[in-house]
Image: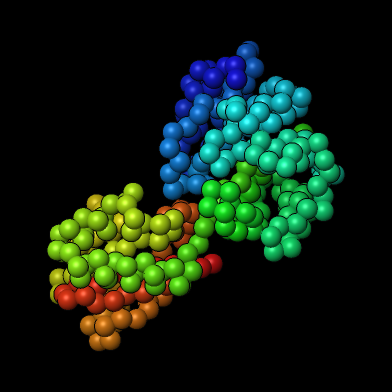
Amino acid sequence: MKHLRTGLLGLAAAMVLGCGMALPASAAAADSPAPAPAKLGSIDRAKAGRASELLTAAVAYLKHNGAKEAFEAFNDRSGSFVYGPYFVYVLGTDGFMHANGGNQFSLAGHNVIDMRDAAGKPLVRDLLEAAAKSPNGAVEYRWLNPEDNRIEVKTSLYSLVDGYVVSVGYYTPRATRAEAQALLDRAVGFLKSNTPDAAFARFNNPQGDFVQDDQYVFAIGLEDGKYRASGASPQLNGMDVRGMKDAAGNPLFEEMIAVAKKSGSGTVHYVWRNPATNAVESKHTLVQRVGDVLLGVGFYTK
């Protein structure tokens, strides 16, 4: 797609993960057509930020280049408005799909007002109703994630522009209690069958097999209260967490240590940042004592 290099320069200031910033005024006011976004690198855990970046770029492109050129660009599945699981789709306020860069069933060019999600929710009507109330926002629904062939929660960010609802969605897979327990059991077995240093090094790898979507393994010393491992934040190793509190002011780690010492295993409830959504959410952590440390794996709920 043309203007790709210009796009990289024009979007650099706006592409901050999760910021939701608008494009610089100079980009919108330039004499040349608004640029398409540059292809981004590896998809990281800040999924909302990635979706926000693409939506910001799409809105700027539509405003500056007009509907016809923008829809052609958004529908180009090998172009700069599609990367990985992220793509732009555009609805008219009547439910007509003007563009869709990611749907394999060619929804673009059809009225999809009655489309429902995997749970039967009228997602298009909900999106249009939300846009009628507020020009910017988000809706949630359940949709098949083609990357893992699972029905997962998907959030679509949207902006109402010149009578069109421009949207970009992202998946936020949520581990179940059973999945958290399975990961904890695997971590316990790994620690028992390896040296502590080897196990902690494995748990500390954010790209390793003990970090899965919004789940990760952490280890804390029962006597000194110090992190031995944390897959989401390995830089915390060695930190004494006994004085740390959750977002509601609860001494969560002291409670975990107390549960592990008294019962050997259990569940602690608190509120914590979800690394997959960057939002503070309710978290439930399963803990188990292994020698002089506790291992924990949590799962999030809204």
Residue at 63% across, 12% down? 31
The image quadrant where one finds the C terminus is bottom right
Residue at 62% across, 13% down? 32
Q: Which x, y percent locates residue 1?
A: 60, 20
Whether residue 20 is situated above or below residue 40 in the rendered picture: below
Taking the view exactly as shown, the residue that stands out farthest to the bottom is: 262
Q: Which x, y percent locates residue 62?
A: 69, 28
The answer to whether any part of residue 11 appears in the image is: no
The answer to which image quadrant residue 58 occupies is top right
Q: Which x, y percent locates residue 199?
A: 21, 61
Q: Which x, y percent locates residue 225?
A: 19, 70
Given residues 70 and 24, the one toward you in this image is 70
Taking the view exactly as shown, the residue that stands out farthest to the top is: 31
Residue at 82% across, 50% down? 113
Whether residue 142 is situated above or below residue 96 in the rendered picture: below
Given residues 238 and 250, the one toward you in this image is 238
Whether residue 205 is situated above or below residue 36 in the rendered picture: below
The answer to whether any part of residue 78 appears in the image is: yes
Given residues 157 and 109, the one toward you in this image is 109
Residue at 73% across, 61% down? 121
In the image, taking residue 136 as reference, residue 196 lies left or right, namely left
